[in-house]
Amino acid sequence: MTSKITRTLSESQEGQIVEEKIYKANGEISFKRYSKGRFLGKGGFARVYEFLNLDSKQISAGKIISKASLNKSRARQKLMSEIKIHRSLNNQNIVRFEHFFEDSDNVYILLELCTNQTLSELIRRRKRLTEIEVQCYTFQAISALKYLHAHRVIHRDIKLGNLFLSDKMELKLGDFGLATKLEFDGERKRTICGTPNYIAPEILEGTHGHSYEVDTWSLGVLIYTMLIGKPPFETNDVKLTYRRIKMNAYSFPDQVPISKEARDIVSEILINDPTARPSLDDLLAHPFLCKNSLPKLLPASTLAVPPSSA
Ligand code: ADP
């Protein structure tokens, strides 16, 4: 096959057929057809639906990005970079990139379907998680980050809403829209990006650039948020949140009892000097993750209620 173009057959919602036109090397044309199903969610640029491949019967998450939203060359470049980075990755704790194609109106990205939503919806339902759950998800998030950093990729947007849960309750890191791949060891990145509550202080300071340690910082914010139920630097005003991050102004509320090890791992990560933060291997050896044996996966019942042993 040499090139692919697609065309949308109808404009209705559920059940709409999306057709991918495939030009083969011998000049023949074939079609791959997908049925657009349930709406899964909406992001900055994308609408996401279940996509059923009508030949293989495989169901994926289909991210639809309208080309009209890509009229600025920066937006187009960002999407191309997201696709280039994401499709090169293959790890159990990263949402699998399956395929992408386009038609005259949209770009379509097919991803591994994560049926149990994200940690954001989980925290909304459960308010906060038990330590066993936080240990289990932290371990899987670190596995994803170790893989990424070994491939010179910095995610730069680690947060509850980008950590998906599969049907087996495996944690899967997704959304590579802000990710970057370093060209060489020691390269420093200068773009200001991230999500306000999770952004690392060195990105806000902007003086020496930033590197892998920004993901470790966001992991610290994530662990705190799972344990306490809200992010450590959250305020109603983004500027004030940034000031708090720069001053490292956060505390553990007395109303939520947490272990010394849990408190320690958060305070060891949330250090403003990125060179003083623990490595991912240091974190895997931290008492918070080693003090008891962990279940590899949590039961689906924990989507609604705490694990029974907690
Ligand atoms: P954007 O890149 O535009 O921010 P997202 O990747 O955040 O879009 O996706 C928007 C929403 O779509 C998510 O919050 C989630 O509800 C849903 N979604 C995205 N990817 C998947 C997936 N692989 N499986 C299930 N739902 C998904």
Image (cartoon, rainbow, N blue to C red):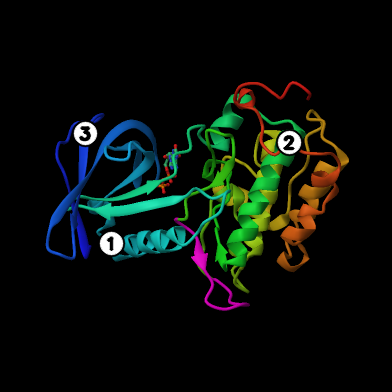
Mark 2 or mark 1, which is nearer the start of the sequence? 1
Name the outermost residue toward the front.
Answer: 26
Figure check: 130 above or below 192: above
User: Does the Cβ of the disc 2 residue fall within 8 Å of ligand 1?
Assistant: no
Is residue 107 something one can see in this rendering? yes
Which amino acid, mark 3? Answer: Gln
Query: Which residue lies under the disc numbered 1?
Result: 72
Q: Characterize the local packing of mark 1: few (<14), some (14-19) or many (20 or more) Cα atoms within 10 angstroms.
A: few
Query: In front here: 11 or 260?
Result: 11
Measure the alpha-carbon separation of dots 1 and 3.
28 Å
Question: What's the distance in space between the residues labelled 1 and 2, CA to CA?
Answer: 46 Å
Q: Which circle, 1 or 3, is nearer the viewer?
A: 3
Question: Residue 187 lies in magenta, yes or no?
Answer: yes
- Residue named by callout 2: 295
Circle nearer the N terminus (1, 3): 3
Badge 2: residue crowd in 10 Å (few <14, some 14–19, many ≥20): few
Residue corresponding to mark 3: 16
| Amino acid on which the number 2 mark rests in the picture | Pro
Q: Say which amino acid is labelled 1.
A: Lys
Above or below for 308 versus 285:
above
- What are the residue bounds of the magenta stretch? 177-189
Residue 33 is left or right of residue 160, and the answer is: left
Asked which secondary structure carries label 3, the reply is: loop
Q: Secondary structure at mark 2?
A: loop
| CB atoms of marks 1 and 3 within 8 Å | no
Find out whether residue 185 is within the magenta segment: yes
Where, by quadrant of the figure, is residue 125 drawn? top right
